[in-house]
Image: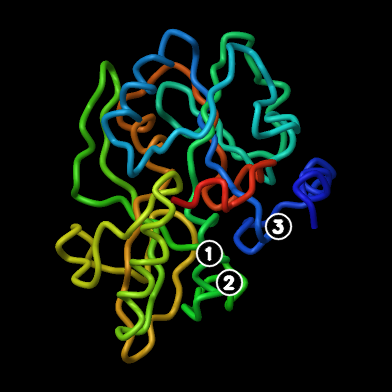
């Protein structure tokens, strides 16, 4: 499936997590903020590059981007709408609430390097299970910027212990889509007490001999929105990404 074909399916109403979609094509997180908050987020991203690696930024009101030729209002499978930091809607189309002053940021997504993990022989449990990746708010604070602050969000993939060094090497070559893990094992050190209850996405089985491996996650901007409470914001529903026109190898270093 090409990105254009996938976007057409989402525009027609298909609502599913996008992990495993369009192998070979990069996926991205979306966060759209009013123009007077856009500089704060750009600075927040610059100060927290592993969690918020910016791939593209639109002009105010634009509904497509240089790496996304679809419509940012309709061509993701699901969106979240925030008012004053509160989640007020999760929907398949944000045309009705779109504003001409919104600046949209496409932020790198770890789904982009999952094909490389699979090609290297590293299992990806949520793809095997047909579920969303589990994501967690941690006790690690991001560096604040202007009116934005928040904690780091991570995604987790169980990896056989003997394959962890390989998973680290593979993903470290994709710094624009979160890069190497931020933590391996010992979830308590991230303030995570129960991996069976993620803050976003779905829990996955951790089998004997596997370690939980945590990568920085592009839901971090939405965590900052929830804490910092800007008047309005639109994001992707976690795990329901923008499938871009960029190839995954474009971000291989």
- Depth check: 152 or 94 in front? 152
Q: Which residue is mark 2?
A: 127
**Quadrant showing the N terminus:** bottom right
Q: Point out residue 169 in the picture as x, y percentages from the top left corner.
A: 35, 66
Choose the circle earlier in sequence order: 2 or 3: 3
Q: Which residue is mark 3?
A: 22
Q: Who's the residue at 59% across and 48% down the image?
A: 27
Q: Residues within 10 Å of mark 3 (few under 14, many from 20)?
A: many
* Disc 2 + disc 1, Cβ < 8 Å: yes
Classify residue 62 by image quadrant: top right
Choose the circle earlier in sequence order: 3 or 1: 3
- Depth check: 176 or 150 in front? 176
Q: CA distance from mark 3 to mark 1?
A: 11 Å
Position of 186 relative to 96 (above/below): below
Q: Point out residue 132 in the picture as x, y percentages from the top left corner.
A: 55, 62
Numbered badge on residue 222: none
Choose the circle earlier in sequence order: 2 or 1: 1
- Depth check: 143 or 55 in front? 55
As helix, strand or loop, the secondary structure at mark 3 comes to: loop
Q: Who's the residue at 28% across and 45% down the image?
A: 152
90 lies left or right of 87: right
Q: Who's the residue at 31% across and 73% down the image?
A: 212
Q: Which residue is mark 1?
A: 114
């Amino acid at each position: 499936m090409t990105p254009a074909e996938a976007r057409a399916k989402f525009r027609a109403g298909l609502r599913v997590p996008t992990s495993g979609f369009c192998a070979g094509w990069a996926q991205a997180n979306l966060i759209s903020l009013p123009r007077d908050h856009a500089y704060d987020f750009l600075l927040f991203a610059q100060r927290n590059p592993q969690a918020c690696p910016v791939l593209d930024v639109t002009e105010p009101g634009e509904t497509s981007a240089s790496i996304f030729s679809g419509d940012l209002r309709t061509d993701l499978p699901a969106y979240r709408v925030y008012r004053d930091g509160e989640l007020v809607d999760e929907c398949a189309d944000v045309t009705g609430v779109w504003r001409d002053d919104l600046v949209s940021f496409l932020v790198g997504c770890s789904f982009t390097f999952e094909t490389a993990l699979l090609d290297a022989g590293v299992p990806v449990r949520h793809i095997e299970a047909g579920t969303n990746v589990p994501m967690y708010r941690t006790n690690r604070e991001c560096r604040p910027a202007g009116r934005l602050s928040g904690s780091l969000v991570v995604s987790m993939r169980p990896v056989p212990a003997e394959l962890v060094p390989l998973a680290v090497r593979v993903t470290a070559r994709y710094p624009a889509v979160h890069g190497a893990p931020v933590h391996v094992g010992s979830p308590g050190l991230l303030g995570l007490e129960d991996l069976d209850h993620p803050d976003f996405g779905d829990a996955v089985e951790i089998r004997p001999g596997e370690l939980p491996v945590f990568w920085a996650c592009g839901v971090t901007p939405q965590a900052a929105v929830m804490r910092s409470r800007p008047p309005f914001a639109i994001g992707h529903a976690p795990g329901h990404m923008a499938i871009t026109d960029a190839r995954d190898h474009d971000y291989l270093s």
